Image: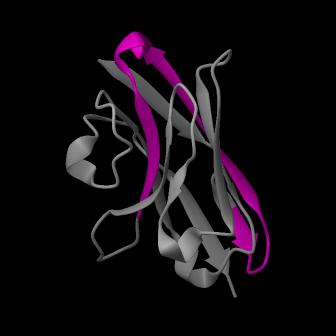
Amino acid sequence: QVQLVESGGGLVQAGGSLRLACAASGNIASTRVMGWFRQAPGKEREFAAAISWSGGSPVYADSMKGRFTISRDKTKNTVYLQMNSLRPGDTAVYYCAASSLTAVGTTTTEFRSWGKGTQVIVSS
């Protein structure tokens, strides 16, 4: 099992930026893919971005391409989500997730370990 702890959320004005971090611990050797999801009030959890732990091209949801960047630092067992040009519609709780599958997934069922989330609020 992998333990995940998110940080970096907060309140930001529209057009601003935030960088989220996800620190992983535990059975990291079983992790193949790290991802970020988000869930707005009253909505389902949705995919944001994912990256292979060993490298390779990241995958983004269409609405986040060009604004969000996922990266990982293997020396720190940490994954980041740089979010630029934030909009009120980006307001949500952002969750980090880990998958033991080889393919970079985009659905919640492909990720078995989850953090508790960090709140992001974008004001207009």
Residue shown at 34%/39% (left/top)? 103
The colour scheme used to paint the residues is one colour
- Provide residue 53's location: percent of width, then percent of height: 51, 28
- Provide residue 63's location: percent of width, then percent of height: 53, 76
Residue shown at 20%/47% (left/top)? 109
Instruction: Judge by depth and name the residue closer to the eye, 81 or 101.
Output: 101
Whether 33 is drawn above or below 39: the answer is above
Q: Quadrant of residue 1?
A: top left
Please tell me whether residue 36 belongs to the stretch shown in magenta: yes
Q: Main secondary structure of the magenta part?
A: strand
- Left or right: 60 with respect to 15? left
Whether 39 is drawn above or below 104: the answer is below
- Left or right: 49 with respect to 105? right
Image quadrant where one finds the C terminus: bottom right
Q: Quadrant of residue 96?
A: top left
- Provide residue 122's location: percent of width, then percent of height: 65, 75
| Magenta range | 11-38
- Provide residue 84's location: percent of width, then percent of height: 74, 66
Q: Quadrant of residue 97?
A: top left
Residue shown at 77%/64% (left/top)? 17
